[in-house]
Image (cartoon, rainbow, N blue to C red):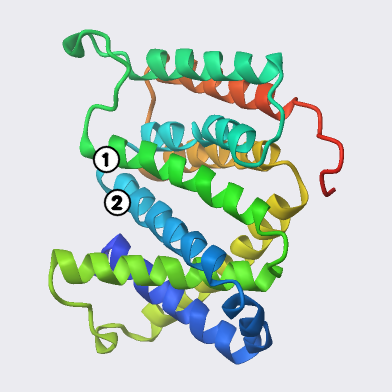
């Protein structure tokens, strides 16, 4: 899509628009449940929209693996949110995970020119970090909204991403790419992406609703493995030793966080 002159944000607008249309055609019976819970649906949609938009912008402008690593600090934010919001108890393992994740972030982001401060070095990396926080909030909201159906949560995600992305395009350029710009091949590509996104959203909402929020967030770390392989073969991207070490520490922290025992009464 980039080779066709379509930005990542514009691609998000159209792929999620297709997802919404398909949902309206084949899953419209689930709309009623979504409309009955606006106080949860709206925050879930808006947070999902920001998470997706900031992640897309970060990947476009930043180093893929650094963006991924910063984004996948999200299990730690989930651990904190789950403790204070969902009242899931945090044991010693949880605090160890927080410490290791902070150490991993410091190692990964160490830059002597910045005085060694563990902070993102550009806008893309700040977006990646905030996207990870947004992802954690989204997971916790989905976990808390037990009364909403799987499809209702998925609807809110698709509409949220579409709405936030189109607002960004209007703010940034004042225009939205016309549908007539695309040829049949472009539409088929976007249709395939939309189907994959719909499946992924459904799987995510199913998982985060039925397991502890932190553990669900941890399982997303497998994407790091996929990203590393894809980056190596598709973009010839390599990582410095400190980025590898920092990433390993972050993943180790995630394993510690996932190792927390389930609380009594949690839905399995």
45 sits to left or right of 58: right
State the image coordinates of residue 213 (x, y, percent, origin top left): 67, 42
Separation of residues labelled 1 and 2 (CA atoms): 7 Å
Along the viewing direction, whichever of 256 and 145 lies nearer the viewer:
145
Quadrant where the N terminus is found in the figure: bottom left
Along the viewing direction, whichever of 15 and 86 lies nearer the viewer:
86
- Under circle 1, the secondary element is helix
Residue tagged 1? 124
State the image coordinates of residue 132 (x, y, percent, origin top left): 45, 40
Tell me which label, 1 or 2, sits earlier in the chain.
2
State the image coordinates of residue 30 (x, y, percent, origin top left): 67, 82
Along the viewing direction, whichever of 137 and 194 lies nearer the viewer:
137
Q: Are marks 1 and 2 in contact (CB under 8 Å)?
A: yes
144 sits to left or right of 62: right
Identified at 38% across, 36% down, the residue is: 129
Relative vertical location of residue 173 with respect to residue 88 in this rendering, above or below: below
State the image coordinates of residue 171 (x, y, percent, origin top left): 17, 66
Identified at 32% across, 66% down, the residue is: 165
Res 61 quadrant in image: top left
- Tally of numbered tags: 2
Identified at 53% across, 51% down, the residue is: 138
- Under circle 2, the secondary element is helix
For disc 1, the neighbor class at 10 Å (few under 14, some 14 to 19, many from 20) is many
Evaluate whether residue 61 shows in this view: yes
Evaluate whether residue 193 shows in this view: no
Identified at 57% across, 79% down, the residue is: 35
**Tag shown at residue 183:** none
239 sits to left or right of 43: left
Residue tagged 2? 57
Relative vertical location of residue 57 with respect to residue 66 in this rendering, above or below: below
Relative vertical location of residue 58 with respect to residue 104 in this rendering, above or below: below
């Amino acid at each position: 899509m980039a080779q066709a002159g379509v930005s990542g944000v514009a691609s998000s607008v159209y792929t999620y628009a297709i997802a919404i249309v398909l949902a309206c055609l084949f899953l419209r019976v689930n709309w009623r449940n979504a409309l009955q819970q606006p106080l949860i649906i709206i925050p879930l949609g808006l947070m999902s929209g920001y998470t997706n938009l900031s992640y897309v912008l970060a990947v476009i402008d930043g180093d893929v693996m650094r963006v991924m690593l910063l984004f996948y600090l999200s299990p730690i934010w989930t651990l904190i949110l789950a403790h204070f919001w969902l009242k899931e108890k945090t044991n010693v393992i949880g605090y160890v995970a927080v410490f290791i994740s902070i150490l991993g972030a410091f190692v990964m982001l160490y830059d002597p020119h910045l005085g060694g401060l563990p902070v993102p070095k550009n806008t893309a990396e700040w977006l990646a970090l905030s996207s990870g926080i947004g992802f954690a909030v989204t997971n916790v909201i989905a976990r808390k909204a037990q009364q909403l159906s799987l499809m209702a949560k998925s609807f809110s995600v698709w509409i949220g991403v579409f709405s936030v992305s189109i607002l960004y395009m209007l703010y940034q350029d004042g225009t939205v790419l016309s549908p007539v710009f695309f040829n049949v091949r472009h539409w088929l590509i976007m249709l395939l992406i939309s189907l994959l996104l719909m499946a992924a959203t459904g799987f995510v909402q199913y998982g985060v609703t039925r397991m502890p929020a932190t553990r669900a967030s941890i399982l997303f770390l497998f994407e790091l493995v996929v990203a590393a392989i894809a980056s190596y073969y598709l973009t010839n991207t390599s990582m410095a030793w400190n980025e590898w070490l920092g990433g390993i520490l972050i993943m180790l922290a995630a394993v510690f966080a996932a190792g927390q025992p389930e609380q009594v009464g949690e839905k399995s």
